[in-house]
Amino acid sequence: PKPQNGHPDPPKPQNGHPDPPKPQNGHPDPPKPQNGHPDPPKPQNGHPAPPKPPIYRGKHIMCLPYFFLMGYPKCGTSKLYTLLLHHPDYVATVKEMHWWTKHNMSNDPEANELEIYQYLMYYSYNYTASVRRYPDRNVLGDCSASTAWYGTFNKSFEDLPSDALPYILYKFFPKSKFIAITRNPADRLRSDYYFFSGTEGRVPVALLNAGNLHLVANHTFRAYEACVRSGNPDFYCVHEYRRWLPSPLSPILKSWFRLEATMYYYTLKQWYKYFPKENILVLRNEDLYQNATAIALQMYDFLGFTQIPKENLERLKQESTKEITKYSFHHMQQLMIKKQKMKNITHSISDLAEEVKTEKVESEEVPEKVDEPVYMEDRTRAMINEFFEPHNKKLAKFLEDDRFLWKQV
């Protein structure tokens, strides 16, 4: 065709084909496009362009989570995540999105379909580029520690069946693998109480002490038992026991002491309804801190990672020997006071302490403050162990592993 609008003539074809581009700087010509795909990107700044994503039937492959580090909080999920980072097969992602559990959904199916698509696109958009930059790192995981036990999409278990989330994830990711780490219930509940009650601003720091921990544990266990006596199934009471707490709630009873994140048997067994046992790895916090390297290698093998390079293994061993950061009672109080101030807590500590002190809670004395660094009294640990003994037996029988009786802890 003749040139129009002032544009120059197109190159003359040779043998019916257009002229190939001329080589530059002595480099060979780039490969010609094949099968209708565009030319590869040209190198910039002297660096080769990143490889293009794989193509399958004309569509880009989407990166989605291959596994879920699904729980439990205050059991060592952060330590496991750190160990994952030492393996070159793992693509570092945001540790905890809590999307499937704490993301609010509407009652509109079409709107929910869009919400779920956004989750899928989040992984594809944010991490496909990482996989392209580092082709050897190709395993993604959702490491939200609430996946194992929390209500789906922030809804009550009055609105959803107990296996709602396992069912949903099975439909989306039927071959996914799941890692859960547990901990002796008494230690998990103690850690939960001090860490979240203060940092989340639920309870003034002056009221976080061993005496009030005993009070909270006592009322929580009685509430659960009252729920069961009312004819409700165990799983329901694991999540809804708070309905049987004394009303109105005192500030102390608003603290974090979560049975639902500690009664592992009732939440774990929901996942085994849909996923085979070889796709679920259940670990213990006590084993992790006794030999973190062994647990890391067990986790790599479970996920099908390649053999870890020697230099990475050495760094892993160094990481495994690091001690947990231990804070003094005073340091932890100061940390929680700082976080509570950031949340604009308006109640004075003295007023709340007096409110709790004067409340009648079945003649139990509520200590206002304990100055000595005692995190849990012996009577509290004994009470927690007694309460959890039948539930731990169910877990040990279900997993066919007596270590989950926690007899040696």
Image (cartoon, rainbow, N blue to C red):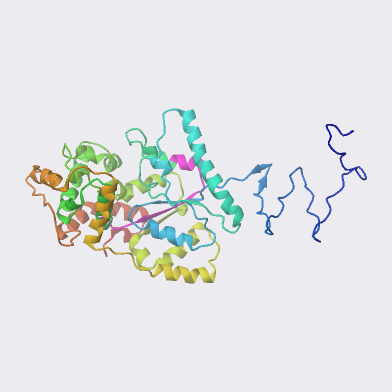
- Judged left or right of residue 306, residue 105 is left
State which quarter of the image contains the C terminus. Answer: bottom left
Give whichever of 274, 256 is nearer the camera: 256
How far across and how far down the image is residue 213, in percent? 18, 52
- Judged left or right of residue 322, residue 119 is right
Which residue is depicted at the point 40% across and 66% down?
A: 292
| Vertical placement of residue 285 versus 362, above or below | below
Give whichever of 196, 232 is nearer the camera: 196
Which residue is depicted at the point 39% across and 70% down?
A: 321
How far across and how far down the image is residue 214, in percent? 16, 52
How far across and how far down the image is residue 42, in percent? 72, 52
- Judged left or right of residue 233, residue 98 is right
Q: Report if residue 82 lies within the magenta region.
A: no
How far across and how far down the image is residue 275, in percent? 46, 47
| Vertical placement of residue 379 versus 366, above or below | below
Q: Report if residue 168 lies within the magenta region.
A: yes
Name the residue furthest front.
Answer: 6
Name the residue furthest left.
Answer: 363
Residue 14 can be seen, yes or no: yes
Which residue is depicted at the point 15% across and 62% down?
A: 372
Q: Examine the image and state in which quarter residue 162 appears.
A: top left
State which quarter of the image contains the N terminus. Answer: top right
Residue 192 can be seen, yes or no: no
Counting the numbered discs, the total is 0
**Where are the magenta residues, as a range?**
167-185
- Judged left or right of residue 12, residue 327 is left
